[in-house]
Image (spheres, grey):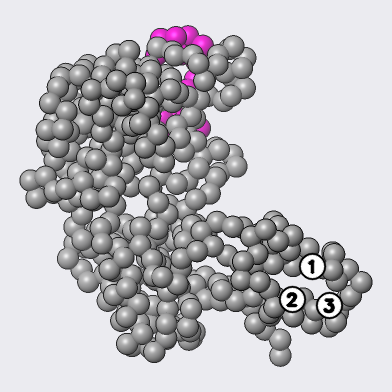
Amino acid sequence: MDRMVGTVVRGIRAPIVKTGDNIAQIAVDSVLKASKLDGFSLKDRDILAITESVVARSQGNYAGIDDIASDVKNKFNCDTIGLIFPILSRNRFAICLKGIAKSFKKVYLQFSYPSDEVGNSFVTYDALDAADINPWTDILTEKEFRNHFENTNHIFTGIDYIKYYSDIIKESGADAEVILANNPVSILKYTDSVLVCDIHTRQRSKRLLKNAGAKVVYGLDDILSSSVNGSGYNEEYGLLGSNKATEDSVKLFPRDCKSLVNKIQKILFDETGKDIEVMVYGDGAFKDPVGKIWELADPVVSPGYTEGLSGTPNEIKLKYLADNQFKDLSGDELKAAITKSIENKDDNLKSSMEAQGTTPRRLTDLIGSLCDLTSGSGDKGTPIIYIQGYFDNYSV
C-alpha cells in the first residue's frame, strides 16, 4: 500500500518543570512514554524539540529588577539615560524597564513608530499619511503625537504603551520624557548615554550611535551578560529573550543549549538506537496577518540544535514539474517521473527553476516556527514537540 502520511507533528505533554530538574531526562522520558501510550515508533532523523522556557526554568536562569538595576547602574554611572526602540510588551519589556528605570533620575524613552520592530503598532501607515507625517524624518514629542492621534492603544491588548511605560518609569522614581523617532541618532539631542533596546537591529543602532558621538552605548544584550549578585545571566543575549516571571523578576533566555541538545541526542541513541535530531526553540518567525505582528521577539528562533539541523531545505517544486517538464503525463507515469526527478535532484538547487517557490529559510527557523505554533504559549502543556517525516519527500 502506498504511504499516505507525510510529516507528523506531536505536542508531547511533560511534567511541570522546576529549577534543578533534569530537563534532558525529562524530555527523553516524556517522548518515550508518549511513544508507548500513543503507539508510534521512534525513527532515525525524527526531531525532538523543547521550548526554551522549560530549559531556562530548569537552569534557574532568573534575575530580579534589583539585579538589572545594579548592572545598568555600574555600566552607565550617570543620572540620565536614553532608551531607544523598546518593543511594546508587558511580558517582554515591562519588568526589565522597572529595573532599568531604578538606576536613573531621568529617562528619555524613544519609541519607533508607527510600530515597534516586531510589528506592535501605535497607528497605521495610512493614519500617518492622513496626518502628513513622514516617519522616516519627523521627530515627534508625545504631545505632538497625541495631538494627531486620539487612540494609540494596542490592537490586541488595548494597552496604551506610551502611558504604561512612562508610568513604570515614574513609579520607579525617575522622570520620563517620550519622543517618537525612527533614527536611533535622534536620541542624542537629549542625552549621550543610550541603552539600545531593539532586538534584531541592535548592532546597527549601536554602530550609528557610536559613530554619531554617543558617549556610552550598551544594548539589552549587554545587560546581565554575566551574573550579578548570583543572578541568572546569558553571556550572548543578556536580557534579550527574557520573559516576565513575577512582578519583580524575569526568566532569561537559556544558556548552554548546544551541550543540552547533544546530551539529549546521546541519551535517545543509547536508549533507542535511533539517531534523532534535537533542538531548543523559542519564538517562531511568522507574521500575524491582522495585527501585522512579527512573532520573533527572541533574538533567535533556536539557541541550540544538533548538527543534522544545520542548513536550508533543498527541495523541488512538485507543481512546477507537473506543469512544465511532465505536463503531458498523468497517473502512475507522472508519479514515476516526478519520483525519479526527486531521487536524481542536484545537491544544491538554489538557482534552479525547479526550486523556485520553495522556502530557502534555515531549517531551524522553519522547524522552530512549526514547534511554536504547535505548543502555543498558554495552557496546552506540551513544551516538547516530536516531529516525524520532516525530511521525507514524495519519493519515500
Q: Which residue is mark 1?
A: 321
Which residue in the structure is indicated by mark 3?
334
The amino acid at mark 3 is: Leu
**Mark 1 / mark 2, whichever is N-terminal:** 1
Quadrant where the C terminus sits is: bottom right
Q: Find residue 341 and name its label.
A: 2
Q: Nearer the viewer, residue 60 or 108?
A: 108
Q: Quadrant of residue 287?
A: top right
Task: Check if mark 1's residue and mark 2's residue have beta carbons within 8 Å.
Answer: yes
Work out how far the residue at label 1 is from the one at label 3, CA to CA, in angstroms: 10 Å
Residue at the image position 28 percent from the left and 42 percent from the top: 221
Tell me if residue 155 is in the magenta stretch. Answer: yes
Which span is picked out in magenta? 142-159
| Comes first in the chain, label 2 or label 3 | 3
* Quarter-of-image position of residue 280: bottom left
Where is 303 relative to 241, above or below? below
Residue 177 appears anywhere in the view = no
**Mark sitting earlier along the chain (1/3):** 1
Residue 87 appears left or right of 287: left
